[in-house]
């Protein structure tokens, strides 16, 4: 089981060029604004305020690097698709995030967050398809599962699988999480831990 022993905020950048040297494996968290990304990151690292829980949706437009256990980076990518931003930046995923996702050589896996209460959104599917087509490994992390019953969450996953099966033969790993009930914390950390172990064995 992956234990978080240390966390350190390293940098907040508006372009890939300014990010830390890609010498350590990294896991990038992405999702619509307000999906619960900051809350989930804080749950995973066991800190209340490492990532800033935003009260203004869509505000963080930077790539934030956090060094974990002095050995890997947790990356908080800008939230996408929400009002209050200009139309240009609103359009799906930002150029900055796209550039990062396509070119970051040390990227191990993208953790794509999806609100369990929402049916698969066009914009979410767009990003999932973008990741798939670009050959970027990703996992689907459902958030706010405390808001729905077990039955409802199964239904939501079923809808996602149906939408994905139109394009994809295999499904990505999926996790059900809640920053409130702490559901899924161990599973996500375990997944990251195993991915890091696999890298070391290579
Ligand atoms: P971000 O914009 O994706 O970083 O989302 P935040 O972490 O700032 O959370 C957005 C809103 O959703 C806040 O009001 C949180 O309190 C709420 N929220 C986040 N995680 C959960 C969760 O697991 N369960 C519930 N019920 N609400 C959550």
Image (cartoon, rainbow, N blue to C red):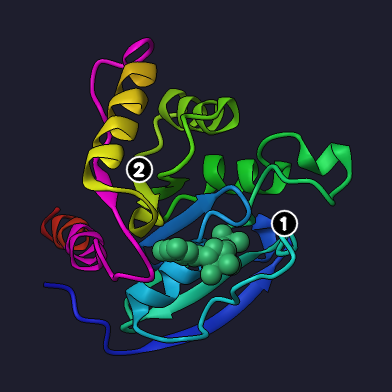
Q: Position of residue 62 (x, y in %)?
A: 69, 63
Report x, y in % for residue 76.
Answer: 54, 64
Tell me the CA gap for discs 1 and 2.
20 Å
Among the 4 quarters of the image, the one containing residue 168: top left
**Residue at position x 63%, y 53% in the image:** 33
Residue 102: x and y, percent? 54, 39
44 horizontally vs 187: left or right: right
* Left or right: 37 as drawn, with respect to 149: right
Crowdedness of circle 1 by 10 Å Cα count: few (<14), some, many (20+)?
A: many
The residue indicated by pointer 2 is 140
174 in the magenta segment:
yes
Residue 20 visible somewhere in the drawing: no
**In the image, residue 32 above or below residue 3:** above
Q: How many marks?
A: 2
Which region is colored magenta? 165-193
Give the residue number, with chain letter if any, for mark 1.
58
Is the CB–ligand 1 distance for label 1 below 8 Å? yes
Q: Is residue 96 visible?
A: yes
In terms of secondary structure, where does tag 1 sit? loop
Residue located at (20% from left, 57% from top): 191
Q: Is residue 45 above or below residue 124?
A: below
Earlier-in-chain disc, 1 versus 2 = 1
């Amino acid at each position: 089981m992956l234990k978080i022993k240390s966390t350190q905020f390293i940098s907040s950048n508006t372009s890939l060029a300014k990010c830390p040297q890609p010498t350590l494996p990294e896991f990038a968290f992405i999702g619509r604004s307000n999906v619960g990304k900051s809350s989930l990151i804080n749950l995973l690292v066991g800190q209340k305020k490492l990532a800033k829980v935003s009260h203004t949706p869509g505000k963080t437009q930077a790539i934030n690097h956090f060094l974990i256990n002095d050995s890997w980076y947790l990356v908080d990518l800008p939230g996408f698709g929400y009002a209050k931003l200009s139309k240009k930046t609103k359009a799906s995923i930002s150029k900055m995030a796209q550039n990062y996702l396509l070119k970051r050589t040390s990227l191990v896996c993208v953790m794509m967050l999806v609100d369990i209460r929402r049916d698969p959104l066009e914009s979410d599917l767009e990003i999932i398809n973008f990741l798939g087509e670009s050959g970027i490994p990703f996992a689907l992390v459902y958030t706010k599962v405390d808001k729905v019953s077990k039955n409802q969450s199964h239904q939501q996953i079923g809808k996602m699988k149906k939408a994905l099966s139109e394009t994809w033969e295999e499904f990505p790993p999926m996790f059900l999480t809640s920053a409130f009930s702490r559901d899924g914390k161990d599973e996500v950390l375990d997944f990251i831990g195993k991915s890091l172990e696999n890298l070391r064995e290579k």
